[in-house]
């Protein structure tokens, strides 16, 4: 009798844990097609911005005729880099705020 009870208990626990894992996968599971498309579009937009900035810097360096002109290009590159960095920091802060909201914690 004890062996039979033990087997039923073991089978029941295995069944319950597999159902819990299945529900976790549904919660964490694959993202929707719309969300995937939005993320993909955003990443493509970010890459296009970087490519255009690099192209702008490249054309500046290519057209530079002396050291002074090259310095101007270097300054332009720093400005573009700082804008991208500020944008990245802003997006990071937004992500952290969303994460804190989900966890119910306070952002520092």
Image (cartoon, helix red, strand yellow):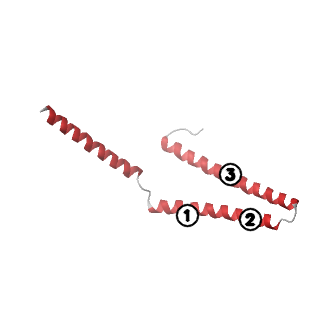
Q: Which residue is mark 3?
A: 85
Q: Residue at x 76, y 67 (%)?
A: 59
Spot occupied by residue 46 in the image (x, y as percentages of width and height): 62, 60
Identified at 26% across, 40% down, the residue is: 13
- Label 2 vs label 1: CA separation? 22 Å
Q: Earlier in the sequence, mark 2 or mark 3?
A: 2
Ranked by sequence position, the earlier of labels 2 and 1 is 1
Residue 71, position in %: x, y? 84, 57
Q: CA distance from mark 1 to mark 3?
A: 20 Å
Nearest to the observer: residue 103 or residue 75? 75
Q: Position of residue 62 (x, y in %)?
A: 79, 66
Q: Nearer the viewer, mark 2 or mark 1?
A: 2
Question: Split into 4 quadrants, where in the image is the C terminus?
Answer: top right
* Residue at x-position 49% and y-position 41%: 103
Lateral position of residue 38 relative to residue 17, left or right: right
CA–CA distance between discs 2 and 3? Answer: 17 Å
Disc tally is 3
Report which residue position mark 1 lands on.
41
Return the x and y of residue 24 as percentages of the image width and height. 37, 47
Secondary structure beneath disc 3?
A: helix
Residue at image mark 2 = 56
Classify residue 45 as left or right of residue 67: left
Which quadrant would the N terminus be assigned to in this image? top left
Residue 41, placed above or below residue 106:
below
Q: Point out the residue furthest to the top here.
A: 2
Q: Secondary structure at mark 1?
A: helix
């Amino acid at each position: 009798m004890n062996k039979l009870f033990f087997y039923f208990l073991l089978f029941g626990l295995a069944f319950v844990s597999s159902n819990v894992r299945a529900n976790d996968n549904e919660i964490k599971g694959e993202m929707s097609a719309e969300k995937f498309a939005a993320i993909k579009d955003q990443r493509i937009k970010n890459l296009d911005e970087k490519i255009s900035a690099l192209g702008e810097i490249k054309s500046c360096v290519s057209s530079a005729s002396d050291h002074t002109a090259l310095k101007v290009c270097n300054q332009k590159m720093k400005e573009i880099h700082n804008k991208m960095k500020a944008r990245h920091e802003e997006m990071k802060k937004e992500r952290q705020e969303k994460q804190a909201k989900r966890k119910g914690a306070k952002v520092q």
